[in-house]
Image (cartoon, rainbow, N blue to C red):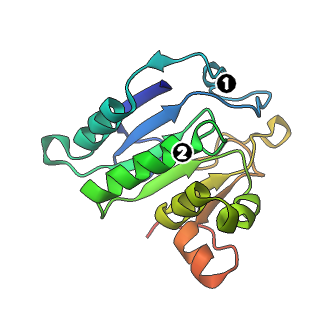
């Protein structure tokens, strides 16, 4: 499989220290994107899926420090990446059930929510992540002062509370 990269000790993407995984491939190709090198589905680095998952799981608790997981892109929720995204999340929560999982996507939450009942991987992902940063980067609304996002149209969503309350609940750090 192809992937764009992994940072084992990331303090920028997510709260606390995170292991950040960048998937490879994105069809949105937003003008001004921070990661245009992740657009090409044939780009990135080659690795066996199970080896990548093993490396990420190991990094989460390396040196006795519990890290969270951030999944970025590319586009982790596109059809080409979503099965691996679900597999990664399933494997991580089996080994580390108490960590927070952050996911960045160009899709809006409502669109993904609509497809939950029709798509097993979307359903699993939404039920097992904690924070979603949704929406495409829009250069017209660029704001580098925003936490976790690059443009004002993007939202930082508390996914468990949104699903539970059946209305949008934005994430605030506790």
Report whether 137 appears left or right of 63: right
Q: Earlier in the sequence, mark 2 or mark 1?
A: 1
Position of residue 86 measured from the top left corner of the image (x, y, whole percent): 49, 50
Disc 1 on helix, strand or loop?
loop
- The residue indicated by pointer 1 is 39
Q: Which mark is residue 27?
A: none
Separation of residues labelled 2 and 1 (CA atoms): 18 Å
* Above-or-below relation of 66 to 84: below
Question: Which residue appears at 49% of the width and 60% of the height?
Answer: 129
* Above-or-below relation of 93 to 59: below
Disc 2 on helix, strand or loop?
helix
- Callout 2: few (<14), some (14-19), or many (20+) C-alpha neighbours within 10 Å? some
Q: Where, quadrant-wise, is the C terminus in this rendering?
A: bottom left
State which quadrant residue 60 falls in. top left
Residue furthest bottom in the image: 165
Q: Which residue is nearer to you in this view: 85 or 155?
A: 85
Q: Which residue is nearer to you in this view: 68 or 120?
A: 120
Q: Which mark is residue 83?
A: 2
């Amino acid at each position: 499989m192809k992937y764009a990269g992994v940072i084992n000790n990331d303090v920028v993407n997510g709260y606390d220290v995170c292991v950040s995984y960048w998937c490879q491939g994105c069809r949105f190709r937003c003008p001004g994107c921070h990661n245009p090198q992740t657009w090409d589905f044939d780009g990135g680095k080659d690795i066996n899926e199970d080896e990548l998952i093993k490396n990420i799981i190991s990094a989460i608790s390396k040196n006795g420090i519990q890290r969270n997981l951030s999944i970025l892109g590319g586009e982790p929720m596109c059809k080409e990446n979503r099965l691996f995204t679900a597999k990664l999340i399933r494997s991580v929560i089996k080994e580390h059930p108490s960590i927070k999982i952050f996911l960045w996507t160009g899709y809006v939450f409502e669109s993904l929510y609509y497809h939950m009942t029709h798509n097993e991987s979307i359903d699993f992902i939404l039920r097992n992540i904690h924070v979603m940063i949704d929406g495409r980067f829009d250069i017209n609304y660029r704001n580098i002062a925003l936490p976790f996002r690059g443009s004002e149209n993007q939202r930082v969503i508390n996914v468990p509370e949104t699903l539970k309350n059946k209305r949008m609940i934005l994430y605030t750090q506790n």
